Structure formats: structure tokens, C-alpha cells
Amino acid sequence: MGGMLVRLRNPSREVEMPGPALVSVLLERLGINRESVLVVRNGELVPGDQRLEDTDEVEVRPVISGGA
Amino acid sequence: MKCVVCRGAAVIDVRRHNANFCGEHFVRHCGEQVRRAVEDFDMLQPEDRVLVAVSGGKDSLAVWDLLVELGYQADGLYIGLGIGEYSETSGGHARRFAESRGLTLLEVDLPGEYGFDVPTGAKAARRVPCSACGLSKRHLFDKAAVDGGYDVLVTGHNLDDEAAVLFGNTLRWDTDYLGRQYPVLPARNGFPKKVKPLVRLSERDMAAYCLIRGIDYLVDECPMAAGNRHLIYKDLLNDLEVRSPGAKADFYFSYLRNAADRFREDRDESVVGECSRCGSPSQGEVCAFCRLQERAVPVTFGGRT
Ligand code: SF4
Ligand SMILES: [Zn+2]
Ligand SMILES: [Zn+2]
């Protein structure tokens, strides 16, 4: 059991995803466009080729703003 | 992944530039992009007094931070729009940022000073919220810049914002709006000079900049933005961007280089008079903001109750 805890927003929710996995692979599995988010692990920004472990807490933070 | 500058561990990959950066060099890269935009488009002079339109979101706090780091004298202006919890929270982010850096933050409260909030104004004027909101913000930012004697008004519009607006204008071939889309608008007819120093940086860049610099911005979106057309265009452009890195920048900067001039003459440059209510520059007798206020707060003007 287990997996990395992934926090998503809009709407705000948490999902568990199997690790280890590269950041880029995680985003692909979640169907998220890399241009529209940043990935933050344990409070630190991580690039696409970073390996994420089962024990990591990951935030997928959207960066797109609406409005005039 | 290694930083292109120092070969240390990278924290962000910027595909458009085919480059990865560590935190320190990414911050430097952003400063350099702003410096180039300012120079290429003649946005600011070193001695200018600058007013930054601040929302508490990533772009406005980042541009304020970047300009101060580049040595500009920049104050901020936050407008309370009366959008429930969003407004309360966003104001807090703006205030804490200003305080932490010892910067001056001016504030205008739309409900407190003009008697209506954005949701009410939008309903009364039968406009979508972002339209009533955008109109109010433009009016109040312009007015504050002129009244405060600032040389230039800065907004945090980034590459994604500008590319999305260009995409919408191009879809409709709206030649009047196309003629107005430029990262610098000179002062004219009582309007302040307006500039967009972040046009060379993407939304993702700005969020990363804030994270790295420890800028605590409001991540949650304004609830009124959901479903707006702007967001659809941004999604489409980002789909294009992943398949073809650099597409957004190419679309926008090629427009500025090769086509913007051709639409300038379509601009409606008719002489502007003064609003009889507030004295702001206006095409009609009463400016759009005062008309909005009149509808949202009829009592104030002795109209319907
Ligand atoms: S999303 Fe729309 S309503 Fe909300 S602050 Fe932006 S322009 Fe105003
Ligand atoms: Zn480096
Ligand atoms: Zn007016």
C-alpha cells in the first residue's frame, strides 16, 4: 500500500500515486500539461527529470490565472 | 538536470530557452528578461517614479520585486474589489509583501469609496464580472497614477496573458484592439504611460520566481474567473507550447515585429474630453466607470431606489 501523496488544486484534492516516478511521468499520468503547473516536493521546486519516491509529499501547483 | 550557468542542480527547466536553471540563476535570468523588455520597448527611465498595480497574485508581486531589485523606485497600489473572501485574502498577501520589503502600498477600496463591489456592479450593468472589474481597475489605477504624479503605471501582464489576448483579438480580427496591443502605451489625453515589463516571461516562470524568492502570493484564483474565455485560449496555447516549445513567444513577438504597426492606424484616436462627474478622460459626457457606478449605486445619484 501507499504511494506518494499528491496535492492538486482547482478543485483542491489529494490523490495517491505509485512511486517512484519522474515528475514528467507523474504529470503525464495525471493528464496535466507541464506548462500549466509547477511541481513542488516537500516545499522545494523540482524539475521534470526529478525522481519522486513513495515517501514524498508533492504539490502540483497550477500557474494559470484568469481575468482581465 | 543541471543549471546552464553553474552546472549545479537545476530546479526548473525552461524549454522555450532550451535551458535549465538553479534557483539563483533562474532569478538572474528573470531579471535579465525584464531588463531587456524595459530596454527594447523603452519602458522606464532610471529616475522614473513607478506605480505597480498589485493584486496579491504571483505576477504583480513578482514584477514589483523585480523592478525594485533592478533599482527602480516603485510603489504599489492595491484595489479592494469586494469579491468576498478572495479580496480579503489577496489584500493580506499584498500588504505582507510590502511590509516585508519596506515598500509603500497605496490602497483603494471600491465598496468603501465608491459604494459598490464587483459582483454588484457586474449584475447592475449586466456585464460579466471580469468586464466590470477590468473597467473599474483600469479607471482606478489610471486615476491613482495621474493623481499621485507617477511617471508610469506598471502591470504584471506576462507572456501568456498577452499571447491569449492576441489570440482572442486575432480570432475576431478585431483591428481596433489589435492596434492597441503593445507592451508600452505612451501617456496621452490624461492617461498615464502604461508598461508591461513581464512580456518576456511566462506564467510558469513567474510562479517559479515567487517560489524561489519566497514571495508568498495568493495561489487560489479569483472565483469570478472560472470559465472565462481567456483561460480557454491559455489552455489552447499551452497545448501548442508543449508540442512546439517557443510557440507562444513566437506568436506574440512576431506579431509585435511584423504586424503590430499595420493595425495602429485603425486605432480610434478621436479627441477625448473630460467626464463631467469625475474629471477623468472620457469619450462621452460621463466616463464608463461613472456610468457603472451610477447603475450599481442608483441612490447616490438620486435615481431609482
Ligand atoms: S478574475 Fe475577473 S473579476 Fe476576478 S479579479 Fe480578475 S478581472 Fe476581476
Ligand atoms: Zn546556476
Ligand atoms: Zn467619470
Image (tube, coloured by chain):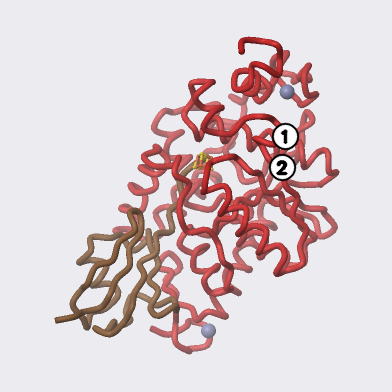
Q: Chain of mark 2?
A: B
Label 2 secondary element: strand
The residue nearer to you, when weighing B15 against B133, is B133
At which x and y percent is residue B113?
72, 34
At which x and y percent is residue B58?
55, 59
Query: Mark 1 highlights which residue?
Result: B113
Q: Amino acid at mark 2?
A: Val
Query: Mark 2 highlights which residue?
Result: B108
Q: Chain of mark 1?
A: B
Can see residue B50?
Answer: yes
Q: Amino acid at mark 1?
A: Glu
Instruction: Spot the brown chain and give its letter.
Output: A
Circle nearer the N terminus (2, 1): 2
Left or right side of B159 for A18: left
Q: Quadrant of residue B57?
A: bottom right
Q: In the image, which is nearer the foreground, mark 2 or mark 1?
A: 1
At which x and y percent is residue B101?
72, 69
Left or right side of B219 for B24: right
Instruction: Spot the red chain and give its letter.
Output: B
Asked whether disc 2 touches disc 1, contact meaning CB atoms under 8 Å apart, the reply is yes
Q: What's the distance in space between the residues labelled 2 and 1, CA to CA?
A: 7 Å
Q: Is residue B58 above or below residue B221?
A: below
Looking at this rendering, what residue extends furthest in the left direction? Answer: A1
